Image: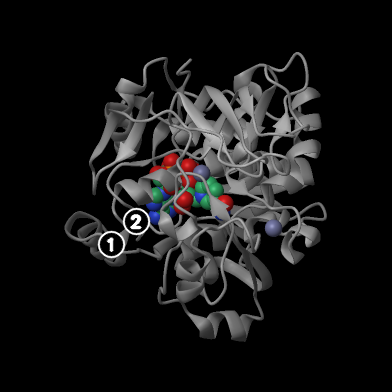
Amino acid sequence: MKALCWHGKNDIRCDTVPDPQIEDGRDVIIKVTSCAICGSDLHLMDGLMPAMESGDVLGHEFMGEVVEVGAGFTKFRKGDRIVVPFNINCGECRQCKLGNWSVCERSNRNAEMAAAQFGYTTAGLFGYSHMTGGYWGGQAEYVRVPMADVAPMKVPDGMDDESVLFLTDILPTGWQGAEHCEIQGGETIAVWGAGPVGFFAIQAAKLMGAERIIAIETVPERIALARKAGATDIIDFAKEDVFERIKEITNGQGADGVIDCVGMEASGGHGLSGLVTTLQEKLTSTERPIVLAEAIKAVRPCGIVSVPGVYGGPVPINMGSIVQKGLTMKSGQTHVKRYLEPLTKLIQTGKIDTTSLITHRSTNLADGPDLYKTFKEKADGCVKVVFHPN
Ligand SMILES: NC(=O)c1ccc[n+]([C@@H]2O[C@H](COP(=O)([O-])OP(=O)(O)OC[C@H]3O[C@@H](n4cnc5c(N)ncnc54)[C@H](O)[C@@H]3O)[C@@H](O)[C@H]2O)c1
Ligand SMILES: [Zn+2]
Ligand SMILES: [Zn+2]
């Protein structure tokens, strides 16, 4: 089969690789009908996540049709269309029982590697390095879905691929990012990054009752999407002082909740620190926690800092600001399974826009290397790339 494979920094190729096989009774094989490139894949492309190996199949946002099931498997039948959350869940460990799906204790085949880095393991993930289990991903024609009896969901009749594909990751990720802000109604929420995750975080904050939603972004197409999603105020981080503008918009109070939808690869903003970050971006590949620093500064005392943006290792942050302002920080890989049913209902009732962000589509995985580059460079108005490989 054809699949998009990682071969090193900025080296993604469309390879022919062996078709996946059933390895366990809890496995299913799906024929991928839709898959997407995520901002998290850029961290792999840019060599910022360790434990990738040449030839690893990428992709953790995918769905498709079940074509084979393990012996005795009953949850799905051949022909069922399923969406597959990016975290793999055993359904039996303490964390799965608590609904903390992204930190399943038993699905990561290389748990000791993750534990060495983080203290304890996190869940196995598709297409996201050997530290999360080394599972092949879904930017491919076929994929083996292990423990398929737990996380994946059958697509309700009448819902097309593009309306449900993002349930696998970015929609619940934006939702969880907003939920972490504990919005009761009437708050001001600031969202850094109006990429795919920010687009959904803004929609979620609005549905939860935020009164003002400040989007911080510089790319015009993404600013337009932020407005469409419900942002009431826009700050162009390349031209304006983000902290000063948030202070002004909130009448000197600061934002009640702040959401970092950018993560470790932030671009440099306005002023001298922005220049330093831009140099760092151009010259080195290291984590750049500029957004996290801004968010911690711009949130009001006793506010909430929500961090869906991905970081891989230690970064310097102002702990003094967290302690002295009494901040709460919430983060994590998304517990996707928690949100599948409620978000499906919101899609069905037309409350969430799942398609405006798709700018690039292809039916040929051979376009993958070029489309990765287009997405990374935000060229050609690119916000989200979707493949329909079958
Ligand atoms: N927690 C999870 O489970 C989870 C799931 C999916 C994605 N993510 C993470 O969320 C982040 C965003 O993902 P995405 O797919 O939207 O990525 P993306 O790269 O398409 O979007 C990031 C956006 O941030 C903007 N940006 C860059 N520097 C900025 C700055 N200084 N201030 C404000 N905005 C800035 C960029 O212009 C871009 O539009 C990534 O770190 C990704 O790894 C986390
Ligand atoms: Zn993702
Ligand atoms: Zn588990």
Q: From the viewer's side, name the closer residue of 198 and 107.
A: 107
Q: How far is disc 2 from disc 1 in space, using C-alphas?
A: 8 Å
Query: Can you say which quadrant of the picture contains the N terminus?
Result: top left
Q: Amino acid at mark 1?
A: Thr
10 Å crowding of disc 1: few (<14), some (14-19), many (20+):
some
- Quarter location, residue 360: top left
Q: Is residue 281 left or right of residue 267?
A: left
Ligand 3's image quarter is: bottom right
- Residue 63 shows in this picture: yes
- Residue 277's disc is 1
Q: From the viewer's side, name the closer residue of 282 and 389.
A: 389
- Quarter location, residue 383: top left
| Residue at 44% over, 60% down | 131
Is disc 2 placed on a helix, strand or loop?
Answer: loop
Q: Amino acid at mark 2?
A: Gly
Q: Nearer the viewer, mark 2 or mark 1?
A: 1
The verdict on label 1 being within 8 Å of ligand 1 is yes
The percent position of residue 114, horizontal first and vertical second, equals 49, 67
Residue position for label 2:
269
| Residue at 45% over, 18% down | 389
Q: Residue furthest front?
A: 71
The verdict on label 2 being within 8 Å of ligand 1 is yes
